Amino acid sequence: MKKILFLFFLWCFIGHSQEYFPNNDDISAVNNVSRAITNATVHTGTGDVIKNATILIKDGKIQSIGKNVSIPKDAVIEDANGNHIYPSFVEAYGDFSMKKPSRAERSRSQQYDEGRKGYYWNDHIRAEQNAIDYFKYDEKAAKKLLEAGYGTVQTHLHDGIARGTGMLVALNNNGDDGNRILRGENAEHFSLDRSVQTNQAYPTSLMGTLALLRQAHFDANWYEKGNSNTRDLSLEALIKNKNLTQIIEAGDKKNILRVDKVGDLVGKQFVIVGGEDAYEMIGEIKNTNASLIVPINFPDAYDVSNPYQEWYVSLGDMREWKQSPANLKVLKENNITFSITAHGLKDVKKLHENIRQAMEYGLSEEDILQALTLTPARILKADDLVGSLEKGKLANFIMTSGPLFDKETKIFENWVQGSKHIIKNRHTPDVDGTYTTTLNGDEYKIVVSGDGKKATIKIDTLKLGSKSSFDGQWLNLMMTQKDSDDKSYSRIVVQPDGKDLTGTVHLPSGDTLPVTLVASSTEEKEEDQEKEEDNKDKEVKSLGALTYPNLAYGASQRPQQETILYRNATVWTNEDDGILKNTDVLVKDGKIAKIGTNLNAGRARVIDATGKHLTSGIIDEHSHIAIDNGVNEAGHNSTAEVTIEDVVDHEDINLYRDLAGGVTTMQLLHGSANPIGGRSAIIKPKWGYPADEMILENSPKFIKFALGENVKQSRYQNGTRFPQSRMGVEQVFEDYFTRAREYEKTKGTDSFRYDEEMEVMLEILNKERFISCHSYVQSEINMLMKLAERHGFRVNTFTHILEGYKVADKMAEHGVGGSTFSDWWAYKYEVNDAIPYNGAIMHSQGVVTAFNSDDAEMSRRLNQEAAKAVKYGNVSEEDAWKFVTLNPAKLLHIDDRTGSIKVGKDADLVLWNDHPMSVTASADYTMIDGIIFFSKENDLRFRESIKKERQQLVNEMIEAKNKGMKTQTPKKREKELYECETINW
C-alpha cells in the first residue's frame, strides 16, 4: 500500500513538473533549466552596481544575484565578462499589440443621443473596454521595443475618454500569451480624446470633456449605492476598477493642471501622461502631487534658412526646440516623480538619442535608468515583478557592451522572463573603426560603421563610392576608382586579425592581392579618447532663462505690486467728483489709497502724468479670447455643466494686446450654439500669471444663455437638434427650469443623484447665478423676461441686444442691463433692424448700458467704441466712458471693487497719453491690482529683446542644419479666434 501511494505521489510530481508542449527552441527558451550569467557589471536599478557579478535564473525568475552566487552543477553558464547588465525598461503607456478600433461611419447630420444600450448615456465613456479583448501579440512591434531595451509594456486601447483597463505584457517573443500576459487588468485609463467608434456629438470641446469626466464619476458613486433601476455596464466597470492605478493622458502643462482638478473633485489622484513642457509651470505642477509619465518627443530644429519662412515660427516654438530637452532635469530637481515613455515617438529608435540629449542637462545614468525601469514599475504597482534586478523578480534584463546610454554602446541581448533575445551577437567581432591600407601606391582611409554595414573610403580628400556588408565573419567592401571615368570596381574581402583586418583585394584587372587594413594607431586612438573626455567634461547645459509666460512679451519675473503715485493727472473718477484736473492718485497694496493734490510720495514710485488722463481700466463684458479648445459645447441644447473657468488660456497673446488697449477685466463667455450654454469666467488679464490667478477671486457666478438664429440652427445644412424654432427655444428654458425644481425635491433623499447641470440651473432659480443672454429681436427679449418673472428671478444682462431700443422701457422695468455693440448691423438677417443709436436710447431709458467687443481685435480699442455713444445719441463724454468701465462693472456685480477711481477700490488703472476716447489715445501704463502689466517702455524693451533672441535662435538652428541634424519645415501656428458661433465638431 505504501509503495502504491509513493508511486502515486511520484507520478503527481512528475506530471506537474513536466512540460506537456513540444519544444523545438534552443535552451534559452526552456524555463526549468538553471542559467548563470557570470562576470558581468550588474546595475540593479536600485542604485547598486555590482562588478564581476553573477545572475542565476530559473523558471523565468532571478534565483540569486551577487558576487558569491552558488551555481548549480547542472546550470548553463554564460560568461558576460566585459559586459554590463541593466534591468529591461518598463513602458508604462502604449497601445502595443492593440487592434485598431473601427471608426464609426460619418453621417451628414449630428448624432446627439447614445448609440448603445445598457451602457453609459455617453458613448465616449467606454470604461467597460478591457485591453485583453483587443490584444493580438505583435512579434514585429515587440522586436523593435526589445531592440530599444524594453522588456515589459503596459498597453491599452487608445480610444475614448474613459478607455477601460490596460494589461501588463512581457515582450517575450519566445513565449506565448499564457506566460507573456502578466496581468490582464492592471490600470484604468482615461484621456481627453473622444472615441472614434461613435459619432455622438457631445462633447465638442475640452470644457465639455472635463465636465463629462466629472459627471461620469459622480454617477458611478451614485450607481454604486444601488440607486439605478437600470443596468449600466460602463459605470459598473468604473466602480470595479477604481482601486487600480488611474492613468489619464492629458498632454501639455495646462491640461495637467486641469485633469488634476477633476481628480481632486472626484476623489482620484491620477497618474498623468504628458508634461513635455512641465518646466514652464513647474511650481504649479509640483503642487498637484501627481506622478507623471513623460514623453520625450523633442522637436527638431526648424529649417530657417529662408528668412521669409523664418517668420512662420514663433519665438515660443523656437524656445521649445531649445529648452524642452531640459524638462526631465527640471522635474528631477523639483522632486517630481516621473517615468519616461516612448509614446509619441515616430520611431522608438529615437529613444536613446533623445535620452542622451536630456542627459546633457545634468541627469545621471541612474536618474534615467530609474525613470525607465523602477519608477514606471512602481506607478503600475508592478515593482514586485519588474523594474529592478532582485531575487524573485522576473529575469528581465539587457546586456550591453558598455554604459547603457553612451553613444557607442551596443545592446547585445534582451532577456525577458529568462528567455534570451539576441539583438546583436556579442561574440561577433566588432569591425567598426578607422583603417588605412596602400594599393597601387595610393593610401586609402577606410571608416567602417554601423556594424560593418556602412563604409566611407577616401584617397586624401577624394571620396570614393563604396558599399559594405558584414556577415559576422567576413567584411566585404566594394569601391569605385579614383579616376571618375573608370567605371570599374575593386572588391576587398577581409576578416578580423587582432585589431586589423586581413584578406584579399580583387582588382578590376582580375588580379588578386593580399591586403591588410591597419587599424588606426594607438596615438590616434588616444587623441580620440582625449576628445571624448573633453566632450564629457564640457559644461553641463542649462535650461536658460524662462519668461512668464514663456513666450514673446513674457517678463523674466512675474510683475509685482508696487506703491505708485500718479502725479498731476486728469482723473476720470466715474464717481460724483467727475473729472478732476491736476490730481494725484496714490496706489498702495493693490488698492487706490488716496486721491488729491500735492500728495506726499514717500517711498512711492512717481509717474509724471502731466497732460495725461488716468482712468479706471476698461471692462469687456463679452469676450471670447484666452479660451482653449472650444468656445462652444454644442453637443446638447443645454450645457450648464461646463465652465469656461476650466479652459482659461493664460498664454493667449490677445491678453497682452488687450492690456495695451487698457483692458483690465473681462468676462469670458461661452458661445451661442445652444439655448443654455456654459458658465462664464470673469478674469483680470494678469499677463505672466497662471489661469487660476487671473480668475477673479470670489467671482460672481454667471452663465451664458442664447436666443435666435444660432440656437435654432438657422444656418445649419443639417440641423436636427431640438429646438429648431424660436418657440422651441422657450420650451427648452421652461423644461430645464421645471426639471431643476423637481431635482431640488430629491435632495436629502437616499436616491439623490448629484447632477452638475441641475445644480447650476438651481443657482439661477435661487438668484445665485446670473444670466448673460445673447439676444437680437424684441419678441425673444420679451419672452425671456416674462419666463424669468414666472420662475421668480430676473435676467441680468442681454448681450448684443441690437433691438434693445425697441423694448428699452420694458428692460428698465424688468431690471435687466444691456451690453451691446456700438455700431454693428446687417451681418445676418436677425440684425437687420439694428441702429447705431441703440446704446444711447437704452441709456436714456435708465437701462445700465455697456459696449462690448465679442471680438479679439475690437477688444483692444473699446476706448474708441465708447466715443461712438457721443457721436450717435449725444451721450455725455463721462457717461459714454462709463459704457466701457463702470457700467460693465455693474452688470458683472463687481462695481464695489472696480470700474471707477475711488479710495479702497482695486487699483485697476490706465494712464492714457491723450483724451481716452480720442483716436490718437494709447495706454502708457495699464495696472491691475497695483501691478503694472503693460507699459510702453517695457513694450519697447520686449521688442528689442525678442529681435535679439530670435536672431540668436535662428543662428543656432542654421548651425544645427549645417551639422546634419534633422530639421522640420517652418509652420505658422495661430490660435483660432473664437466668435459666438464657432463650433469645433
Image: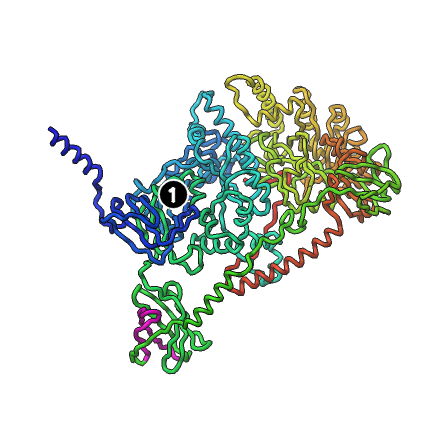
User: Amino acid under label 1?
Assistant: Val
Q: Is residue 601 visible?
A: yes
Q: Quadrant of residue 909?
A: top right
Label 1 element class: loop
Dominant SS of magenta comes to strand
Magenta residue check for 502: yes
Magenta residue check for 190: no
Q: Quadrant of residue 569?
A: top right
> In the visual, does 942 lie left or right of 369?
right
Which quadrant is home to the C terminus?
Answer: top right
Q: What's the image's color scheme?
A: rainbow
Q: Is residue 719 visible?
A: no
Task: Name the one closer to the observer, 244 or 226.
Answer: 244
Residue 627, given in percent of the width and then of the height, sits at 62, 40
Which quadrant is home to the N terminus?
Answer: top left
Q: Residues within 10 Å of mark 1 (few under 14, many from 20)?
A: many
Q: Does residue 603 sit above or below 528 in this rendering? A: above
Q: How many marks?
A: 1
> In the visual, does 739 lie left or right of 806?
left
Q: Which residue is mark 1?
A: 386
> In the visual, does 520 lie left or right of 857?
left
Residue 620, given in percent of the width and then of the height, sits at 72, 38
Residue 816, given in percent of the width and then of the height, sits at 73, 27
Task: Name the one closer to the observer, 400 or 235.
Answer: 400
Q: Does residue 3 sit above or below 613 in this rendering? A: above
Residue 106, given in percent of the width and then of the height, sits at 47, 40
- Hey, which residue is sitting farthest bottom in the picture? 441
- Hey, which residue is sitting farthest front in the picture? 68
Range of magenta residues: 485-508
The residue sitting at 50% across, 32% down in the picture is 268
Task: Name the one closer to the observer, 23 or 925.
Answer: 23
